[in-house]
Image (cartoon, rainbow, N blue to C red):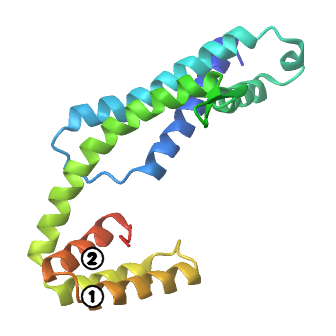
């Protein structure tokens, strides 16, 4: 395997791991009004991490500790190691009773927060519209049936999670302080995102 290809593999690993983190963090509906903005932020951050991981591979390529590894393992190690490195906290500085991290983590977390804030704004707008539309299109009984079915069909739920969600459903539909619209919106939100609002 050639060295440039190994740098691409390191970049791909960092790209993929960043994309997995984004996917785990956000639910974004299919109908997004700001699709171009979403794609720029959604793919720009992982691409940036990938490029930096590829550059890190190139910079570390001559290290004796890495030279003893097979090229493919070196590429995987640097790609995954890049994300660990940027989260590295060298020390913390105590300012006014608050600990502030000092190191690459500070820069990385600042960039991540900047990107995530923009993705979240786009996602919230799309989720709001999608949730309201579904809540208006079905009755409380219809949404309750869909939530029950979603809970039962979700293969990733543990028995404890399934019980917790059924209890949440019961509390939500029996909540005397909530209006019918609020109940339907809470259930519609779960049907669409899999997130129960407490």
Which of disc 1 and disc 2 is earlier in sequence?
1
Locate residue 34 relative to residue 51 in the image: left or right: left
Q: Which mark is residue 173?
A: 1
Where is residue 116? Give x, y as percent: 39, 38
User: Where residue 189 is drawn, which disc sits there?
Assistant: none
Within 10 Å of the Cα at label 1, are there few (<14), some (14-19), or many (20+) other Cα atoms?
some
- Above or below: residue 54 compared with residue 30: above
- Res. 75 image quadrant: top right
Query: Quick check: marks 2 and 1 in contact, CB under 8 Å?
Result: yes
Position in image of residue 145 (x %, y %): 27, 88
Residue at (34, 63) in percent of width and height: 193
Q: Quadrant of the N terminus?
A: top right
Observer-nearest of 194 and 10: 194
**Which residue is label 2 attached to?**
187
Give SS at disc 2: helix
Q: Residues within 10 Å of mark 2 (few under 14, many from 20)?
A: many
Query: Circle 1 — which element?
Result: helix
Q: Does 37 appear above or below 20?
A: above
Residue found at x 22% / y 32%: 36
**Residue 9 appears in view:** no
Q: Is residue 3 above or below residue 19?
A: above
Distance, label 2 to label 1, CA atoms, is: 9 Å
The residue lying at 48 percent from left, 40 percent from top is 19
Q: In front: mark 2 or mark 1? A: 1
For the C terminus, the image quarter is: bottom left
Residue 51 vs 172, above or below: the answer is above
Confirm whether residue 44 shows in the render. yes
């Amino acid at each position: 395997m050639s060295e440039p290809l190994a740098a691409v593999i390191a970049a791909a690993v960092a790209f993929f791991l960043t994309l997995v983190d984004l996917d785990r963090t956000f639910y974004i509906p299919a109908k997004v009004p700001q699709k171009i903005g979403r794609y720029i932020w959604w793919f720009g951050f992982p691409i940036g991490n990938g490029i930096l991981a590829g550059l890190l591979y190139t910079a570390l390529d001559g290290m004796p500790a890495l030279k003893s590894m097979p090229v493919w393992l070196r590429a995987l190690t640097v790609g995954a190691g890049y994300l660990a490195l940027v989260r590295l906290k060298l020390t913390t500085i105590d300012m006014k009773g608050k600990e502030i991290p000092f190191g690459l983590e500070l820069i990385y977390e600042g960039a991540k927060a900047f990107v995530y804030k923009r993705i979240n704004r786009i996602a919230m707008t799309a989720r709001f519209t999608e949730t309201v539309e579904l809540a208006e299109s079905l009755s409380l009984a219809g949404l309750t049936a869909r939530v029950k079915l979603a809970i039962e069909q979700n293969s990733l739920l543990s028995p404890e999670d399934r019980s917790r969600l059924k209890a949440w459903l019961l509390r939500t539909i029996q909540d005397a302080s909530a209006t019918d619209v609020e109940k339907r919106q809470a259930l519609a939100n779960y049907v669409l995102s899999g997130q129960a609002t407490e």
